Each structure stands twice: as structure tokens, then as C-alpha cells.
Image: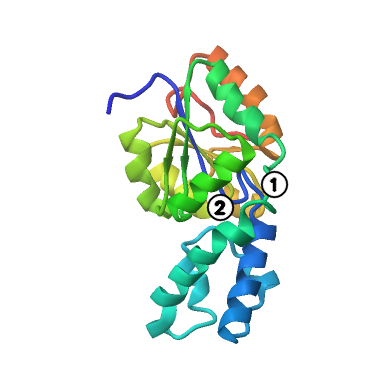
Amino acid sequence: MAAHPLTVGFDLDMTLIDSRPGIRATYRELSARTGTYIDADLAVTRLGPPLEQEIREWFPEERVAEMSDVYRGLYPEHAITGTPAMPGAREAIAAVRAAGGRAIVVTAKFEPNAKLHLQHLGIDADALIGSLWAEAKAEALREHGARIYVGDHTGDVLGAHTAGALSVAVPTGPCDAAELRAAGADVLLGDLTEFPAWLERRVADGGYGTDGLDAASA
């Protein structure tokens, strides 16, 4: 795929959407249906990695695949309508478009469920790629020519750097600012509300990716 002059990738959970309410509700329903204790409040403090990692905390290995499928099946009913957009999410996508660019979403979430979130919230991405985590996110970022990737987790920083993209981090998920800096985030914003102004400055400076962009917070 030919690279667009400006393609920006975004993570989904805790970057574009506050998925904690819906995920909490889905874990509680899974617990009720299986009779297995799941601390849903604890689980939503660890968002980012693939679902199977959290399922292993509550079920034996031989049931992980089965329970992950059950969870994904419950998700549309219990998670979509209760999940809001993060502050600045729509504006961040709009800022990329205003700069003549493309905005893609690259997430570890099961792609059909991720699509339901975007549709419900009216977040219109140019492409959505699911079931990719950490360095595996680089596959989609490279394919779409994304030179900037915005995320809330150290795994997102790793994905960006593996793809040779600029890592823009927001401490709105489980990783705080110090963790994101230590992981090597190139740019640290307070949240997505700061992204449009940051992007406008960088586009004005003539830099879309890592070339010529300083590794500093906004």
C-alpha cells in the first residue's frame, strides 16, 4: 500500500475510548455465567494487552481460549453503549483530516467489537486493524505508512518504534507519564485534547514523522 504523506495511527482502549465501564460490565457478566470469581475492577486497571492475558488470571490455561470466545460474544451486548469517547478523541481524528491526512486505528481488541465502538461513537477512521499488540502493531503501521502512532500504553510505544514511527503517548490508561517516558515515548501529551495543536505545529514545521521532530513533550 502506498504511504500517504500523513498517516496517523491511534490505539483504541483508553486512547480513543474509555472502555472501562463496558469491559467491567462484560467481566461481571462472564463471572455470573461461569460462576468464576473475576475482580472486574482490578481487570480494568490493566487494559492494553490481549484479552487472553487477563483471562489467564481467572481461568486455567485449558479454558482460556473458550472463555475468551465467550467474553467476546458477550461484549457487544454489555460493553458498547456504556463506553464513551475519551476527551478530544473525535477532535484528534478531525485534526488529522484537516491536515489532509489519514487516521487509522490499530488495536489489540477483537476487530468486530472495535468496529462496533467506532460506529456507536461516530469515530470515522480510514482503516481499523484489530488483534495486534505491542511490536505486532508495527505490521499494520508499516502497511498503511503511518509515521505517527498515538497510544496510552508502553506496548504502544514499542509498536510505534518497531514500525519506525514517532511515538505520541497520553497517560490516560494504565501507564503513567513516568512509565511512558521510560519506555521511550517521543512526545508526551496530557491527553488527546492537546493533540490537534501539537499536530498543527508539527505539520507547520514540515515534519510528519520522526525526521526533524524533537523528542519532547508538548
Element at badge 2?
A: loop
Under mark 2, the amino acid is: His
Element at badge 1?
A: loop
In which quadrant is the N terminus drawn? top left
- 102 shown above or below 154: above
On residue 153, the disc is 2
Kindly tell me whether residue 75 is visible in this rendering.
Answer: yes
Numbered disc total: 2
Kindly tell me whether residue 45 is visible in this rendering.
Answer: no
Q: Quadrant of residue 77?
A: bottom right
Mark-to-mark CA distance, 2 and 1? 19 Å
Question: At x 57% / y 46%, what residue is drawn?
Answer: 117
Residue mark closest to the camera, 2 vs 1 = 1
Q: Position of residue 18 (x, y in %)?
A: 67, 50
Question: At x 43% / y 54%, what residue is drawn?
Answer: 134
Q: Left of 189 or right of it: where is 132? A: left
Q: Nearer the viewer, residue 176 or 128?
A: 128
Under mark 1, the amino acid is: Pro
Question: At x 39% / y 47%, what residue is drawn?
Answer: 137
Q: Position of residue 38 (x, y in %)?
A: 62, 79
Q: Give the residue number, with chain letter if any, for mark 1.
A: 84
- 52 shown above or below 185: below
Sequence-wise first label, 2 or 1: 1
Residue lying furthest left in this view? 1
Q: Nearer the viewer, residue 162 or 7?
A: 7
Q: Position of residue 25 (x, y in %)?
A: 67, 66
